[in-house]
Image (cartoon, helix red, strand yellow):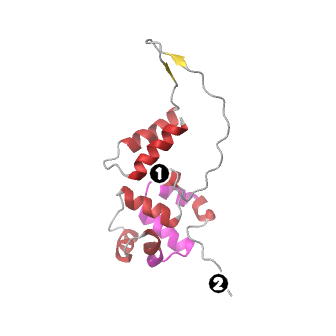
Amino acid sequence: MTEPAVPVGLSTRLLADPAMAAACAARDFTKIFGLAKARGGFHASRIARQCELTPSRVGEVMSGRRSITNMSVIERVADGLRIPGHMLGLATRAWEQRAPAPSRPKPQSAQNVSGSSFLPAPTEDLDSILAIAAATKVTPSTLRSLQTSIEDY
């Protein structure tokens, strides 16, 4: 007899909660961990195990005595709790299912003074690319983010 599978990450319902969305957008891990515990049933030891952190560090973050700013740790939290990359300002995570992109008409190319063509960049994604490029430490995830953003253009 097999045991029922325990969900790996946060529920879709919790991820859709406005408080969780706001905490993720702000990268407020004190609030993210608190909501995971209060509304998702994740104890500090489970968060620690799934995010490859020590229980004491998770406890310090939950109490507000410590923050998480290192990109590799943020990526581990995203992967461990199955928080989609876009919610934390990261590239699409490897475990996320990629939905086929809706087909859009290709933008018209324009000619600049030198005669070479260029495509205007959508401004809404430009800020996210600049934020990634401004990171102080280049990680494999940063490079994947840049590559994905470039491919999207």
Q: Residue at x 42, y 52 (%)?
A: 141
Instruction: Give me the residue at 66% from left, 33% from top.
Output: 104
Identified by mark 2, the residue type is Glu
Q: Residues within 10 Å of mark 2 (few under 14, many from 20)?
A: few
Q: Nearer the viewer, residue 116 or 104?
A: 116
Choose mark 2 or mark 1, whichever is in front.
2
* 43 part of magenta stretch: yes
Residue matched to label 2 = 3
- In the image, the segment drawn in magenta is 18-46
Could you say where residue 111 lies in the image, as x and y percent from the top left? 51, 15
- What kind of residue is marked 1? Leu
Task: Label the magenta part by its dominant secondary structure.
Answer: helix
Task: Give percent across and percent down for residue 22.
Answer: 51, 55
Image point 50% across, 43% down: which residue?
Answer: 148
Disc 1 designates what residue?
A: 90
Cα separation between marks 2 and 1 = 34 Å
Badge 1: few (under 14), some or many (20 or more) residues near its Cα, within 10 Å?
some
Asked if 52 appears above or below 97 in the picture, the reply is: below
